[in-house]
Amino acid sequence: MKLKDKVAIVTGAGRGIGAAIAQAYAREGAAVVVNYSASAEAAAGVVQTIESVGGRAVAHQADVGNLASHEGLVQCALTHFGRVDILVNNAAIDRRVPILDAAPEQWDAVFNVNLRGAYFLAQRAASEMAKTGGGAVLNIASVHDEQAHRNNSIYTIAKGGMKLMTRCMALEWAPLGIRVNSLSPGAILTDINRAVLADDAYKQRVIEMIPLRRIGSVDDLTAAAVLLVSAEGSYITGSTFYIDGGLLL
């Protein structure tokens, strides 16, 4: 098992990419804190799935955009499992709106979760990792950290910030034994884009931009997510892995 005896916090893990990563880590031997903001029932289901195959997990409610909730999230890992080795900053929201119509409230909502919250949660988790000789932070960004996205500028700008955040953290925390990387998915079917991909014409336009000619699934991401926090990825830090079927090409 690649993550035997490790303890991971995965934010936004009640569904979608976060749930898939939480379950993949548990299969590799990690104990997992399944963070959720509002989807308590879904998070409980993820925990049940993990425990049904002998894994260890606990659900914990926390809004990553509320910095005051970070201490409780980290303490949950410490109380139940004794340490923090891995943080996955996966929680994210978007506000699809043309730039001319965007409001400061929409900017603040997205940045509070997608960038500000991720930054300060990583800071708190890294302080625990440093006490035990290191760890790994994995930031779930997006191909839109590189590619502009029409009518979704706030989300795109936040993900661009996450890419540089990853590099800054990797640089500063390498002496502490903490590696920091980003995983940037392309068109992956999740709750955040399920509605727009339900439009067959829009979905077909997206597929035509992908050299591998299909929409990705959350399971397409898990192998890389494991690699980037495991001993097999011990010489990888400050990198961004694009899992996009060639979309950026």
Image: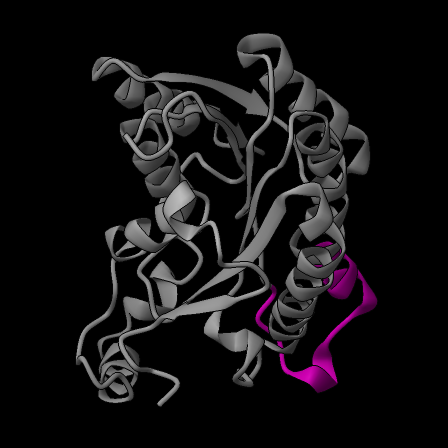
Structure colour scheme: one colour
Q: How many marks?
A: 0
Answer yes or no: is residue 110 visible.
Answer: no
Whether residue 47 is visible to the viewer of this picture, yes or no, is yes
Is residue 135 rendered to the left or right of residue 101? left
From this view, report whether residue 46 is shown above or below residue 76: below
**Residue 39: where, in percent of width, then height?**
48, 31
Q: Residue at x 71, y 40 (%)?
A: 121
Q: Decide which of 72, 134 is in the foreground and name it.
A: 134
Position of residue 210 relative to residue 47, above or below, is below
Q: Nearer the viewer, residue 168 or 242?
A: 168
Q: Position of residue 35 (x, y in %)?
A: 54, 30
Q: Relative to 249, is 91 above or below? A: above
Q: Residue at x 79, y 37 (%)?
A: 67
Q: What residue range appears in magenta?
A: 95-112
Check if residue 153 falls in the magenta segment: no
Task: Name which residue lies at 37% across and 38% down.
Answer: 19
**Helix, strand or loop for the magenta stretch, by majority:** helix
Residue at point 76% right, 25% down?
71
Identify which residue, 184 or 130, lies in the foreground. Answer: 130
Q: Position of residue 165 (x, y in %)?
A: 70, 62
Relative to 101, 51 lies left or right: left
On the picture, is 28 further left or further right than 146?
Answer: left
Q: Is residue 111 magenta?
A: yes
